[in-house]
Image (spheres, helix red, strand yellow):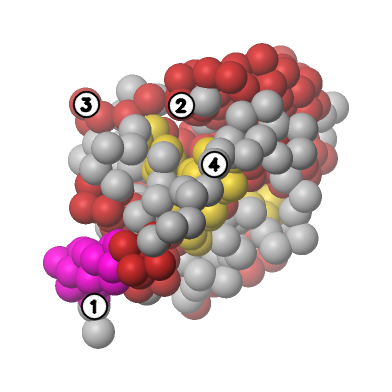
């Protein structure tokens, strides 16, 4: 069953009314709670909702103790493309002061919940920030694989934090600088791949890594028919699949990028063909694997595997 956005909004509204009534009844003589700075934060911590953990890790690092960050979709067990929010997820949006979404139809439910439950909260949309709004229909929504988008989102988040809690502006500036430092290895490996692996070729079972591949200068040789089918989450035609298998059989690419979060026998068949032909396979994931410490350690792990597969310094 598909929960329609309207039903969710109605549920969210009912919850809002209920909590209002509760507050009104218990209000009485008691003074309203005053905003208390907590821990190292010089202001009242903000309430932030992030749709998916690819961005949640980044936002949490930028927030430190000055925001409570609730990430709706986390852990790779759920395919974010197929996620449908439950009422408890919808409820998270009600008190949100800032909402961060991926955008580009990837998490449309979050944009709708933001508009319905927190209409006054600013929304940071990663696809829009990376310039994808103009061509959202055809564009690749996996923009957390685009180093420029990561920087743009981090900058926008810090700017909004400072606007929402001016007393903590210095704190947020410091967190932003620390996050920048922790991305150093990530930027370094992107740079060295670009210098040493630019022009090498790849094919991919799914488009998830394409923006990073482009950033390091790899050439995409995925058969276009297969790529179009995968982008629309449909099965490739036998001819398109055959073209992919022949490409690998002929060792027509330097590496196969394999999204382990894509299910089905087709990607497995492609992987088997690569292994049989001796084309190195690099595993990537759509979202942060459960064991990953942070966005940057997850990305650096994958980029190191790519450098090794291509036989270049990473
Ligand atoms: Zn995807």
In the image, which residues are magenta?
3-21
Q: Residue 258: image x %, image y %?
A: 59, 56
Q: Is residue 264 above or below residue 137?
A: below
Q: Nearer the viewer, mark 2 or mark 1?
A: 2
Q: Quadrant of the C terminus?
A: top right
Q: Residues within 10 Å of mark 2 (few under 14, many from 20)?
A: some
Q: Is residue 189 above or below residue 44?
A: above
Closer to the chain start, of discs 2 and 3, is 3
SS assignment at label 3:
helix
Which residue is nearer to you in this view: 262 or 157?
A: 157
Which residue is nearer to you in this view: 91 or 27?
A: 27
CB atoms at circles 2 and 3 under 8 Å apart?
A: no
Q: Would you say 45 lies left or right of 302 here?
A: left
Q: How much space separates mark 2 and mark 3, taking CA atoms?
A: 28 Å
Closer to the chain start, of discs 4 and 2, is 4
Residue reaching furthest to the front: 29
Q: Which mark is residue 2?
A: 1
Q: Residue beneath label 2, please?
A: 164
SS assignment at label 1:
loop
Q: Quadrant of residue 10?
A: bottom left
The structure residue drawn at horizontal position 51% and vertical position 70%, both measured from the top left corner, is 78
Q: Quadrant of residue 218?
A: top right
């Amino acid at each position: 069953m598909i929960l329609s956005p309207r039903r969710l909004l109605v549920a969210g509204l009912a919850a809002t009314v209920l909590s209002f009534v509760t507050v009104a009844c218990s209000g009485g003589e008691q003074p309203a709670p005053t905003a208390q700075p907590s821990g190292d934060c010089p202001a009242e911590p903000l309430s932030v909702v992030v749709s998916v953990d690819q961005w949640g890790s980044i936002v949490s690092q930028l927030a430190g103790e000055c925001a409570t960050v609730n990430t709706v979709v986390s852990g790779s067990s759920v395919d974010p493309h197929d996620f449908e929010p439950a009422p408890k997820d919808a409820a998270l949006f009600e008190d949100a002061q800032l909402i961060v979404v991926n955008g580009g139809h990837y998490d449309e439910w979050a944009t709708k919940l933001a508009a319905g439950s927190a209409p006054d909260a600013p929304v940071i949309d990663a696809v829009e920030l990376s310039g994808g709004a103009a061509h959202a229909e055809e564009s690749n929504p996996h923009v957390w694989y685009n180093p420029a988008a990561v920087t743009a989102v981090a900058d926008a988040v810090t700017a909004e934090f400072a606007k929402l809690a001016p007393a903590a502006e210095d704190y947020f500036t410091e967190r932003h600088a620390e996050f920048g430092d922790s991305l150093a290895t990530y930027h370094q490996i992107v740079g060295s791949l670009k210098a040493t692996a630019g022009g090498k070729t790849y094919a991919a079972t799914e488009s998830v890594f394409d923006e990073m591949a482009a950033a390091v200068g790899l050439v995409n040789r995925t058969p276009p028919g297969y790529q179009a089918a995968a982008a629309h989450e449909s099965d490739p035609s036998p001819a398109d699949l055959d073209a992919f298998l022949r490409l690998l059989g002929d060792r027509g690419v330097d590496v196969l990028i394999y999204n382990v979060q894509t299910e089905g026998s087709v990607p497995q068949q492609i992987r088997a063909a690569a292994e049989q032909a001796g084309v190195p396979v690099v595993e990537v994931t759509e979202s942060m694997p459960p064991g990953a410490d942070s966005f940057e350690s997850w990305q650096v792990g994958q980029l190191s595997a790519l450098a090794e597969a291509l036989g270049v310094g990473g």
